[in-house]
Image (tube, grey):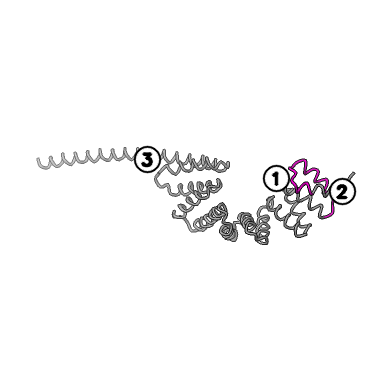
Amino acid sequence: MKHKGVSKSSKKIKQLVAVLVMLLIGLGSVGAVRQYNRMQNKQELRTQGIEQYHAGAYSQAIEYFQQALEEKTWFDQKTDWDIRLYLADSYFLDGQYIFAMEQYEILSEMPRDEEYADELSLQTQIVQGFIDYSHQDYEAALSSFQAVAEAGHLECTLYAGICADELGREDEKIAYLTTYLSYDPNSAYACTQLADYYLTQGRYETSGQYIRQGLQSTDRSCDEALRFLEIVYNEYCHNYNEAYTLMKQYIEEFPVSEKVQREYDFLLTRQTIE
């Protein structure tokens, strides 16, 4: 009788264990389904954010990336790193430098390979440069832009040149803008600044080269300034008829300031066109 009692008790324990196992399996299945759905939703939000990011709609991208980070899933550290990096870049490209800095600082504390740490350090310095630049602290901004430019980010030489200009360091400005133009030959701004500098230095041939490069680029942001420089360049080269012809075209397209009017009046006395 004792043996049978033990057998019945053992059977009940096994049944209870089976029930508990089934319950745990059920709960685990529910949890797994929830995790799967969250993961799917997280990936969908990430994809939508990346689409907006590449479309240049950074504000919308930021919203999607923030929502994606709010979806907590198992083993999501690698995915969150990627999403947060896009979020930081979106803030930066949207001109929200303080928020971009916050995200880069979070990223720097997340464990990744050493190569990522070096790149994040440079990106953080770039953002700091823009924060200082927006606060008109050109000395500090120039220091940051110079450091990252020396590390290979030549796109920052444009802002280094602008800061040098604000600080009255003309030689540095020209050096930085010349470097930037080698990085982006299509920059009308750099062409305009260099053309103007060499024109005032009496180096007309060099100035003319930059004027032509700027006018031939697809960047139309400095057409007004470049077209006027082209007129003055021809005047300085004593090509008065050409300068006068260009001036007549200019005043049909752009506002006539006092400086433009004076140049027009001068060329009117020098031209020999009937």
From this viewpoint, is residue 189 visible?
yes
Badge 2 is on which residue? 271
Residue 180 in percent (x, y) is at: 65, 55
Residue 149 in percent (x, y) is at: 60, 58
State the image quarter where residue 252 is shown. top right
Which stretch appears magenta? 237-262
Check whether the beta carbons of the residues at disc 3 and disc 2 lie within 8 A of each other: no
* Left or right, 193 with reference to 61: right
Badge 1 is on which residue? 220
Q: Secondary structure at mark 3?
A: helix
Q: Of circles 1 and 3, which is in front?
A: 1
* Left or right, 63 with reference to 211: left
Q: Which tag, 1 or 3, sits closer to the chain's start?
A: 3
Q: Quadrant of the C terminus?
A: top right
Residue drawn at point x = 47 percent, y = 41 percent: 43
Magenta stretch: helix, strand or loop mostly: helix
Residue drawn at point x = 86 percent, y = 49 percent: 269
Q: Which tag, 3 or 2, sits closer to the chain's start?
A: 3
Q: Is residue 120 above or below residue 57?
A: below
Q: Callout 2, which amino acid?
A: Gln
Q: CA distance from mark 3 to mark 2?
A: 84 Å
Q: Callout 3, which amino acid?
A: Ala
Query: Between 52 and 8, which is closer to the camera in this rendering?
Result: 52
* Left or right, 81 with reference to 256: left
Which numbered disc covers residue 32? 3
State the image quarter where residue 126 is shown. bottom right
Residue 255 in percent (x, y) is at: 73, 42
